[in-house]
Amino acid sequence: MESMSSKENGIPRIESLKVQNFRSLQDVTLDKLTPLTVLLGPNGSGKSTIFDVFNFLSECFQFGLRHAWDRRGKGKELKTRGEDGPIVFELTYRESPKTPKITYHLAIDEGIKGPEVVEEWLQWRRASKGQPFRFLEFKRGIGRAISGEVPEADDIRTESNLRSPDLIAVNTLGQLTDHPRVAALREFITTWYVSYLSIDQTKNQPEAGPQERLSKSGDNLPNVIQYLKEMHPHRLEKIFTVLRKRIPHLERVDAEPMPDGRLLLQIKDAPFEKPVLSKFASDGTMKMLAYLTVLYDPEPPRFVGIEEPENFLHPRLLPELAEECRAASENSQLLITSHSPFLLNAMRAEEVRVLYRDEHGFTQAVRASDITGIPELIQAGSSLGHLWMEGHFGFGDPMVNSGAPKTTIKGA
């Protein structure tokens, strides 16, 4: 088998996500995920909870399970109300389009001394036929794994004991060169970027010093501009070119160190001689600039989550932001939560998941393309945003006080 290096053969893509016992996600599966996916639904439908699944996993790999678990209120707040048993995450992904499908299963529960990984495994099927097999399998810090570039079912599995049951085996073994497939998954998850952008934070004056990637809140935006200016000036000019196209009259953005060591971000409008401080710039300009630094990252994160980009942006900018996101999805997988029909109009039906609460109060998800009548209406010239606002989806509508769908789902 040829080398499975993602740099040679493409980028990793998540094909499905299954979540059990995580807040309102009692049992939800998002399958056939596309490079660009939009989660649509009213407040309280579960969009932010699914968004937080990716944030939770990212924090587990970057800062440890206990950090991610404790800051969310531990098992008492994380588990679905009235449900026992572990929280389960199951990702199916490919490292690149031509490589085998891999399933990653992670089950977490509250132990005597804190969170524990009660079960964790990696599984794949090397050939087109035959049964899938697990090449990594751990329970509460004790397990075994197959080393090597392409694990085979009959390879020797090396027994291992992790130092603590709250350690994630993929995160631990993935730091070793003996486990390239495990390392590839670890690298994939640790590079995820999940945005909780705060406009006020983007207008901060942080200490000077270049930083490669925007923080979740955007508070280091001036540092990222400084980094791009010093290390990737052509990429920064590309960002400015796009920004000028989207924001009329904008000329440039400067990040200049001040004598007291802080970094000053200034926005220059073409009609005026002097730039203005970023704190006086429009919220929409700052938000678009922040998103573009992520979407045009010289080394883009393999997964990008953007929550409700319509906040502070003019509705006419949303289709243009969607255009930028679609272009960025060539190098990153994007997940966007939204309420905006303007953003929805730029999406395809198979890219949209409509979320709603069922009669038991648990989140359910349906692809827009699987709702009877929607593909036909789109083919006839209707837009997704219009169909949603007019109630043609039949559920996921904030004006309808119901859980179960009022329209038919294909295959249901």
Image (cartoon, helix red, strand yellow):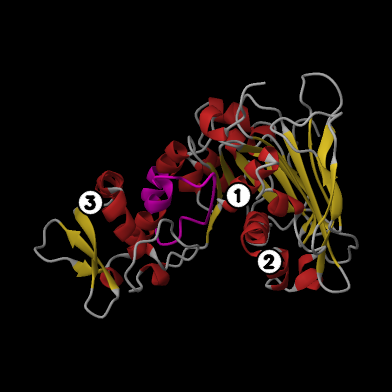
| SS at mark 1 in the image | strand
Q: Which residues are magenta?
A: 292-320
Q: Position of residue 39 (x, y in %)?
A: 61, 48
Kind of residue sitting beneath label 1? Leu
Q: Is residue 194 visible?
A: yes
- Does residue 338 appear in the picture of this structure? no
Which callout, 3 or 2, points to the residue nearer the camera?
Answer: 2
User: Neighbour class for label 3 at 10 Å: few (<14), some, many (≥20)?
Assistant: few
Task: Tell me the kind of residue under disc 2.
Answer: Ala
Question: In this orientation, which residue lies closer to the viewer: 227 or 361?
Answer: 227
Answer above or below: position of 112 versus 392: below
Residue 320 sits in which quadrant? top left
Q: Are marks 1 and 2 in contact (CB under 8 Å)?
A: no
Q: Dot 1 corresponds to which residue? A: 40
**Residue wearing tag 3:** 248
Q: Report the quarter where the C terminus lies.
A: top right
